[in-house]
Amino acid sequence: MLSPMIATCEDTCVDSGSVRKFHDELMNGLHAVAQPLTILRAAMEMLSRSGAPGIDRKHYLEISTEQVVRACDLFSAVQDLVASNVTKAQHASFDLGEVLEPVIEAHAARMQARGVGLAVVRPEPWQKVTGDADRTEQAFRAMLNTALSLASHGDVIEIYTSRAAEFAEITVKHPQRHGKGLNSSDRLSLSLAEVNIVSQLGKYRCAPDPFCCWFALPIEKPVQPERGPFQVN
């Protein structure tokens, strides 16, 4: 399923550096997919011994179900990564708040359940930007998911919004997490986030320790009224 998409991506990459970067991202994604499959194989092996004393069949069934779901999610992310490298992003006007606020609201509930705080600095009002709303939502969600995966009870994840020149900027920061590296699943998510932002002519930066991801999208330019042939400034 992925082979035709990968070949197309290699054909559309403009230089060898882009091809190498894509291959690195893809290999990291496949490595992430392999991890739940390895755990699943071990769980299935234990289930095959379910007649032996001390084997908790329900426990290993739960592990198997969790890892199947995780593997499916990761494989879907690999597909999205390839698709974002192959297909062109949309370039249309959209309200940044309408895209990001539902994601913030959904993650706030998840964070509260885990005892993790959320501090948000919002603009008044949200800017309208030019880009791809779906890719922006997916990238922002990946950043928050990664920040939450690094969080412990009592931590606070911060979201800042600002404007610099002709760009609207969003920062997702987890300042308490020092010395905790990203796993392969996190790196896959952030690779997808980067592709989704850069492909729509946005800017992207990410630092793992302490975790801080930043992206910027061009603010929608106001439409200038057409001047008549005899109008003067």
Image: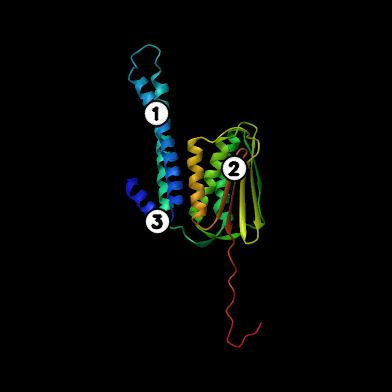
Tell me the crowding category of disc 1: few under 14, some 14 to 19, or many 20 or more residues within 10 angstroms, Cα based.
few
In the displayed orientation, state which residue is furthest to the front.
Answer: 16
Q: Which residue is mark 3?
A: 12
Mark closer to the chain start, 1 or 2? 1
Q: Which residue is mark 1?
A: 38
Distance (Cα) linking label 1 and label 2: 29 Å
In the displayed orientation, state which residue is furthest to the bottom.
Answer: 230
Q: Which residue is mark 2?
A: 207
Where on the picture, by quarter, is residue 111?
top right
Image check: 86 left or right of 211? left
Quadrant for the C terminus, please.
bottom right
Residue displayed at 33% across by 14% down: 51
Residue displayed at 59% across by 42% down: 207
What amino acid type should be assigned to the residue bearing mark 3?
Answer: Thr
Tell me where residue 204 appears, x and y as whole percent. 56, 51
Most foreground residue, 105 or 223: 223
Tell me where residue 37 appears, x and y as whole percent. 39, 31
Residue displayed at 42% across by 26% down: 63
What amino acid type should be assigned to the residue bearing mark 1?
Answer: Thr
Most foreground residue, 98 or 165: 165
Image check: 142 left or right of 67? right
SS state under label 2: strand
Tell me the crowding category of disc 2: few under 14, some 14 to 19, or many 20 or more residues within 10 angstroms, Cα based.
few
SS state under label 3: helix
Image check: 51 left or right of 66? left
Tell me where residue 99 appears, x and y as whole percent. 54, 53
